[in-house]
């Protein structure tokens, strides 16, 4: 494994994302990426194979099959990927449903298929990355090994708050969008939802728009991250937020009073959180807020500030 490079990218939102890229061989990267994500093929969007002009005849029947060897590499100079691949073989003529019929599939690394002479489409996927190639199997003569080049890498997401305060993984989730400067942010294509921290996601090389949610309220940060072919990109997004514990008390440091309903308002009067409990924990973005506590038909309030990375108790006194 080669030494890593540390880069800092500054996204549009103004936050800093620390990005670590680790260069690997194709087989080493494949080994690192294998087994860290759920099977993405259940909702994998295959390319529109019909657009490949499927006007040629399909495979001939009644002929002896030919063995076709296939392998996929990460980048032109990469080693064959040994695991984590899904291979699919399609006929070139659409069926009655308008889709290309799936003839065979295989999972793992390099593979072989016994195919009758004729034309096919090969598709190989590696997580969310994939590539398609047209294949013509000859009647006679040598059958060339099919080498498909995947311009793919891995992405690992994490986040901190303030000046490096670790965030509990259960409080974090990420969304990955296909970044496109020509498309408004709300229309960008969602690639993967609810990605957990420290999860390796396999993606086509390119730039992705990352949305990081810390907690369930308004602690949301965005960053553009580039995935490079044959590299594992580790991105740490910096949140400007903190975890707070709300307490209604009769005196400072006193016991929290049960059956209290809470509302948290921004300085502009917008409600950002509502909850019930003696000492609920919430996450809020950095800023100024008002805590309103309701207990036994009485209402109490307190203004407070949230400082990024400074987890604290917010006590509201009975008056």
Image (tube, rainbow, N blue to C red):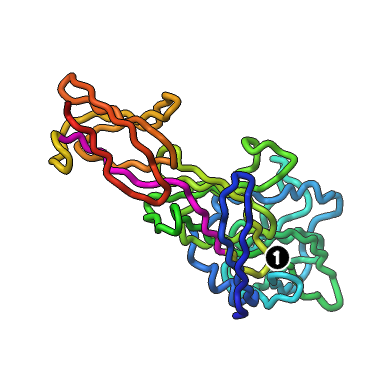
Q: Which residue is drawn at 25% across and 32% down?
A: 276
- Total label count? 1
Task: Give the quarter of the figure containing the N terminus.
Answer: bottom right
Classify the position of the C terminus by image quarter: top left
Residue under the image location 69 percent in, 56 percent down: 206
Give how far across and how far down residue 21 sits, in percent.
61, 68
Few, some or many residues within 10 Å of mark 1 (<14, 14–19, 20+)? many
Tell me if residue 128 comes above or below residue 183 in the rendering. Answer: below
Mark 1 residue element: strand
- Residue 313 figure quarter: top left
Q: Where is residue 16 in the image (x, y as percent from the top left)?
A: 57, 54
Asked if residue 240 lies in the magenta stretch, the reply is: yes
The secondary structure that dominates the magenta segment is: strand
Residue in the foreground of this view, choosing between 95 and 73: 73
Pick whichever, 179 or 266, lies toward us. Answer: 266
Q: Is residue 178 left or right of residue 252?
A: right
Q: Please, is residue 34 above or below residue 225 in the view?
A: below
In this picture, residue 286 sits left or right of residue 19: left
Residue behind mark 1? 150
- 64 is within the stretch colored magenta: no
**Residue stretch in magenta:** 234-249
Of residues 188 and 48, the one drawn nearer to the viewer in this rendering: 188
Residue 33 shows in this picture: yes
Whether 180 is drawn above or below 145: the answer is above
Expressed as whole percent of the image width and height from the top left, the position of residue 141 reads: 86, 77
Note whether residue 60 is visible.
no
């Amino acid at each position: 494994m080669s030494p890593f490079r540390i880069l800092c990218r500054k996204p549009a939102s103004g936050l800093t994302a620390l990005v670590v890229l680790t260069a690997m061989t194709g087989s080493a990267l494949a080994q690192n990426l294998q087994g860290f994500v759920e099977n993405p093929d259940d909702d994998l969007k295959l390319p529109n194979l019909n657009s490949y002009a499927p006007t040629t005849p399909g495979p001939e029947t009644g002929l002896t099959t030919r063995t076709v060897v296939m392998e996929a590499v990460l980048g032109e100079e990469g080693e064959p990927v040994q695991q984590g691949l899904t291979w699919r073989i399609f006929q070139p003529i659409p069926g009655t449903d308008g889709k290309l019929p799936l003839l065979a599939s295989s999972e793992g690394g390099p593979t072989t298929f016994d195919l009758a002479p004729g034309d096919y489409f090969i598709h190989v996927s590696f997580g969310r990355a994939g590539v398609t190639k047209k294949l013509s199997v000859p009647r006679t003569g040598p059958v060339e090994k099919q080498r498909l080049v995947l311009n793919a890498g891995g992405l690992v997401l994490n986040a901190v708050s303030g000046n490096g305060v670790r965030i509990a993984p259960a409080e974090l989730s990420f969304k990955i969008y296909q970044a496109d400067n020509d498309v408004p942010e709300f229309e960008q294509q969602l690639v993967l939802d609810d990605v957990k921290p420290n999860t390796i996601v396999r993606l086509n090389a390119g730039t992705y728009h990352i949305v990081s949610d810390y907690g369930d309220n308004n602690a949301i940060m965005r960053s553009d991250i580039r995935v490079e072919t044959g590299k594992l990109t580790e991105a740490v997004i910096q949140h400007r937020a903190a975890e707070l514990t709300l307490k209604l008390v009769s005196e400072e440091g006193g016991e929290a009073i049960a059956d209290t309903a809470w509302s948290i308002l921004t300085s502009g009067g917008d409600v950002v959180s509502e909850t019930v409990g003696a000492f609920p924990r919430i996450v809020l973005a950095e800023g100024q807020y008002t805590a309103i506590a309701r207990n036994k038909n009485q209402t109490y309030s307190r203004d407070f500030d949230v400082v990024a990375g400074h987890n604290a108790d917010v006590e509201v006194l009975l008056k």
